[in-house]
Every structure is written in C-alpha cells, then in structure tokens.
C-alpha cells in the first residue's frame, strides 16, 4: 500500500487498485503520457435554436443565401470546422488515458490481452448480469481496465 501512496505523491494517479472477492488486483497503467487537450468542449448549436421552439439545438449547416452564420459575420454563432479537431495523438482517448473498446463477451476481451495499456474495455449495454460477472473476472486476470464494471452488479445483501 505504501508503494501506491508513493506513486500518488509522484503524480501518477493512473494506477488503480481494487478489491474483488478478497483478492487484490493491480490495474494496468495507461501508456499515454501526453496531456489530453480539447480545443473546444462546448457544443456547436444550431443558429436561432434559442429563439424558436421548432428549431432544435442539434447542429445543421446554414444554407441560406443571406445567413449571417454561413457568411461568418463577427459576433454570430460559430460553425464547426477542421480547426477544432483534437490532437491526432490524443484523439478518441478517455480522461483516464485509455481508448474505449466495446466488449460483448469474454472472447472479445481476449483481443485486449496485448493492448491493455492502450485500450480499456466497456461492457455493451445489452450484456446480461451473469455474463458481466464473467467478463469482469476475466478482465481482472488479464489486467484489463473495465470502465463500467460496477454496472448492473448487485451486492450480496440485495439478493
């Protein structure tokens, strides 16, 4: 436990330890060392969606001949363009330093065996509770991080 605290003091907060059925597993540390910076985190909203109820907020490119947004006037809604893209090296990375890989069964999890420092598993929404338990146990053996390992799992006193 003291080595984990020393890692935290050194600034390495990506080392997770959790207890599972009285066994102790040390989770994989992400390979990514570069800081993830998003150029823009605010969503691009559709022009005049704040004025009319029938115009929803989801982005649509303005195509009108007189549109101020399309003509890029100063002080109007911004349009999305390639300049707002994330850095190629950190694109698609989650805040925990891993890329997401959706897993439907234990066999899918085996693909992450050699890539456990780059990818983390996310159990698909339509997987049953019984299969989820198997996936979480196998992930702990393979040292693969599972982002939603506590989803749909009941504790012993609930049953």
Image: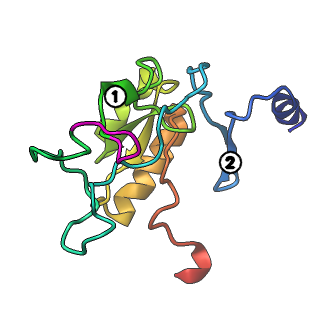
Relative placement, left or right, of 79 versus 18 is left
Q: Is residue 83 magenta?
A: no
Kindly identify which residue carries mark 1. Answer: 111
From the top left corner, tell me how far across and down residue 157 is, in percent: 61, 80
From the top left corner, tell me how far across and down residue 94 is, in percent: 49, 37
- The secondary element bearing badge 1 is classed as loop
- Residue 34 against residue 127 in the figure, above or below: above
Disc 2 from disc 1: Cα separation: 23 Å
Residue at left offset 59%, top offset 19% = 34
Q: Quadrant of the N terminus?
A: top right
Q: Nearer the viewer, residue 82 or 75?
A: 75
The earlier-in-sequence mark between 2 and 1 is 2
Q: Is residue 85 shown to the viewer in this render?
A: no
Kindly identify which residue carries mark 2. Answer: 18
Magenta residues (range): 71-78
Where is residue 61, by image quadrant? Answer: top left
Q: Nearer the viewer, residue 50 or 159?
A: 50
From the top left corner, tell me how far across and down residue 25 is, in percent: 65, 40
Residue at left offset 35%, top offset 48% = 77
């Amino acid at each position: 436990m003291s080595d984990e605290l020393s890692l935290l003091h050194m600034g390495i907060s990506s080392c997770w330890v959790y207890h599972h059925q009285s066994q102790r597993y040390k989770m994989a540390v992400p390979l990514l060392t570069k800081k993830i910076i998003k150029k823009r985190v605010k969503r691009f909203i559709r022009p005049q969606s704040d004025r009319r109820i029938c115009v929803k907020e989801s982005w649509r490119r303005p195509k009108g001949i007189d549109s101020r947004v399309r003509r890029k006037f100063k002080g109007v809604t911004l349009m999305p363009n390639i300049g707002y893209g994330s850095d190629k090296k950190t694109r698609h990375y989650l805040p925990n330093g891993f890329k997401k890989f959706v897993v439907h069964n234990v066999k899918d999890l085996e693909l992450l065996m050699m890539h456990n420092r780059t990818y983390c598993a996310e159990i698909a929404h339509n997987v049953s509770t019984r299969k989820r338990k198997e996936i979480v146990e196998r992930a702990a053996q393979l040292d693969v991080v599972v982002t939603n390992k506590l989803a749909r799992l009941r504790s012993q006193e609930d049953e």
